[in-house]
Image (spheres, rainbow, N blue to C red):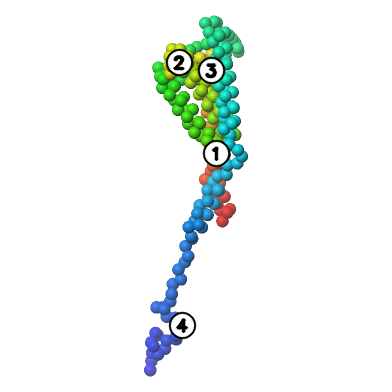
Amino acid sequence: MISTQGSPHTRDDAVPSPADAVEVPVAEPTEPARASESASVDEAKTERPRGPRRVGVLLVVAMLAFLIDLGSKVLVVARLENHAAIKVVGDVVTFQVIRNSGAAFGMGQALTIVFTMIASSVIVVIWRIARRLYSLPWAIALGLLLGGALGNLTDRLFRAPSVFRGHVVDFISVQHFAVFNLADSAIVCGGILVVLLSFRGSNPDGTVHQPAEKADKAEQARK
């Protein structure tokens, strides 16, 4: 008798037929494994914060900037206001007192109260960032910004003609440029430092954000 493949007469029980084949499932990564992989990627992109918080450095820098600005304004108002300008570097740099109702370098003189509110907001934002501040360069940068903002805000609040509308004392005159004060200088220096730190990938919490290319290489090295 001729039997075909799969016939009961020719079937070998030791060899499973296609119908009897059992597909073995492939185990998927568990949730802890996925979390571990995600953590590895995050660690490749950033470095953990190190060292103590730098709030004290921020406050010291801010206080120094504020006191130097305040002292310089008191001195020049007492000695230079209503007097002839003092030449420091020929006619290029001179000291002369000018009451400024606008922002830094004499801009926006019709918006005095607006700039007062902006300065107040900047101080609040800086103080909120300070709660997670671990980077020394960021502490110096934010301290300069805070001290400069406090210096000009003090003029807005306590100088004539009225509260929130006080005129800022400017006295450093650069030919063909502007008349400004030390608070303005602190704000500009702090702002430049913030831009440089951000460009380098530095964060206020002490971490360093790496470029995407470096993060990919670090991820491949961990595999």
Residue at numbered disc 2: 166
User: How far, Cα to Cα, is label 1 from label 4?
Assistant: 65 Å
User: How far, Cα to Cα, is label 2 from label 1?
Assistant: 36 Å
Do callouts 4 and 3 mark residues in contact (Cβ within 8 Å)?
no
Q: Position of residue 166 (x, y in %)?
A: 45, 15
Residue that lies at the very extreme toward the top in this rendered image:
83
Identified by mark 1, the residue type is: Asp
Q: Nearer the viewer, residue 79 or 53?
A: 53
Q: Residue at x 57, y 50 (%)?
A: 218
Identified by mark 2, the residue type is: Gly
Mark 2 or mark 4, which is nearer the start of the sequence?
Answer: 4
Mark 3 or mark 2, which is nearer the start of the sequence?
Answer: 2
Mark 1 or mark 2, which is nearer the start of the sequence?
Answer: 2
Name the quadrant containing residue 115: top left
Residue at numbered disc 4: 15
Residue at numbered disc 1: 205
Question: Of helix, strand and loop, which one carries label 2?
Answer: loop
Residue at numbered disc 3: 181
Q: Residue at x 52, y 20 (%)?
A: 151
Identified by mark 3, the residue type is: Asn
Q: Residue at x 57, y 16 (%)?
A: 71
Name the quadrant containing residue 182: top right
